[in-house]
Image (spheres, grey):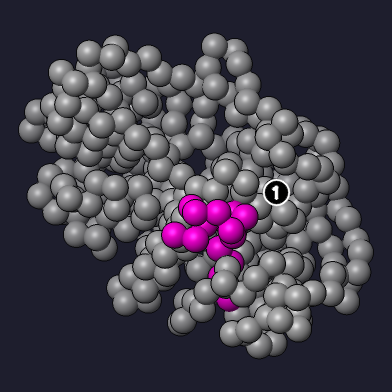
Amino acid sequence: MRMRSYQVCECGAPLRLAEAEAPTPQGSEVLLKLLAAGVCHSDLHIWDGYYEVGGGRKLNLMERGIKLPLTMGHENVGEVVAIGPDAKGVKVGDVRLVNPWIGCGDCKVCRRGDENLCVKPQSLGVYRQGGYSTHMLVPHTRHLFDIGQLAPRDAAPLACSGVTAYSALKKVAATLKDEPVVLIGAGGVGLMGVTLARKMGARDILVVDIDPAKREAALQAGATRAIDGAAPDAVKQIHAATGGGAWAVIDFVGSSQTANLAIGAIVKGGTVVVVGLFGGDVTVPTPFLPLRAMTLRGSYVGSHGEIAELLDLVNRTGMPQVPIRTRALDEVGAALDDLRAGKVVGRVVLTPAG
């Protein structure tokens, strides 16, 4: 069984096509034929090999354990084509969503179900070979989820953009039904956040983005209002729209500008959740934390349990109405270039199986 993969062999250089025999699963491993692979903005950082951390400084990802050549792609749905002798719970022909956020499996954090927070991550498409390929090896069946009636191309983005938005929204769930929630950024994750917020009971959703096309997409997805984040009075507009400041702001961009906007937008006692990895830094006067009783926290993808909760939610209430464009596996380089250039509204999903 031949396998074709597009790999990062040198940071910043074009992806290279690699062809080889597909691996034979051992032990608890499962081999999937990829049906759908979402293209995520974080792959641009992995491809570049660093995150911007402000002040001209960079966080080098190769120094943090990422090794080349690497097949990226962490939003994957595939068909089981081979299983190891110890793999239980799946059979050849099953279609499964893959939880890519794998930890060591043994530590206290992993045992409580938060493998995404493990300090020894083994994430697929980041530390292990991912889904920009015709086939992918998954180390254990516990990482595989039945997608029910969902189509593979719709289900694939749930593994990252979906569960990332869902996990962030859960952190402010106490205010969703009674107070406006502000979502900064209407890219793939932000649009997922709009639709999931509605499904989680939010009645008033304010979206902030600098791109008019993405603001319009947010309104189409169910946002109540949309504000231009580049407007000089953007913070004042948020205060006016929320009746004096927001109790909850989720920053799906994660730049210096958006984080500062988020902090300025909250009311006393409000919460800012930073999700995006755009890069930069932010300085908060320490007296602000107690005097404003503010909460500034991060949210990193989602847990095994949250993926299960999200799949249950969308199977009961329907898929989030996020625009999805499918492209062939051979177009992965062009898809990433379009994402970097800001040309993608919603999500691009590769269809390796044709």
Based on the picture, tell me whether residue 99 belongs to the magenta stretch.
yes
Which image quarter holds the C terminus?
A: bottom right
The image quarter containing residue 27 is bottom right
> What residue lies at 83% left-to-right and 36% top-to-bottom?
10
Residue depicted at 70% across the width and 57% down the height: 130
Residue 247 at x, y percent in the picture? 17, 37
Question: Could you tell me residue 289's position as x and y percent?
Answer: 23, 21
- Figure quadrant of the N terminus: bottom right
Where is residue 48? Give x, y as percent: 70, 32
342 up-or-down from 168: above or below: above
Q: Nearer the viewer, residue 135 or 345?
A: 135
Is residue 107 visible in the rendered structure shown here? Answer: yes
Eyeballing the image, is 309 above or below 297? below
Label 1: element kind = loop
Q: Read off the magenta span.
A: 96-112
Q: Is residue 246 left or right of residue 310?
A: left
Q: Is residue 20 left or right of residue 49?
A: right
Please rate how many residues cluster around mark 1, counting C-alpha atoms within 10 Å: few if below 14, some from 14 to 19, many from 20.
many
Q: Nearer the viewer, residue 231 or 273?
A: 273
Q: Amino acid at mark 1?
A: Tyr
**For residue 260: magenta?**
no
Which residue position holds label 1?
127
For image coordinates 50% across by 68% down, the residue present is 155
Residue 220 can be seen in this image: no
Q: Quadrant of residue 310?
A: bottom left
317 on left or right of 187: left
Q: Nearer the viewer, residue 266 or 205?
A: 266
Where does the image place residue 333, in percent across and percent down from the top left? 73, 46
Please say if 60 is above or below 351: above
The residue lying at 26 percent from left, 31 percent from top is: 295
In the foreground, 38 or 9: 9
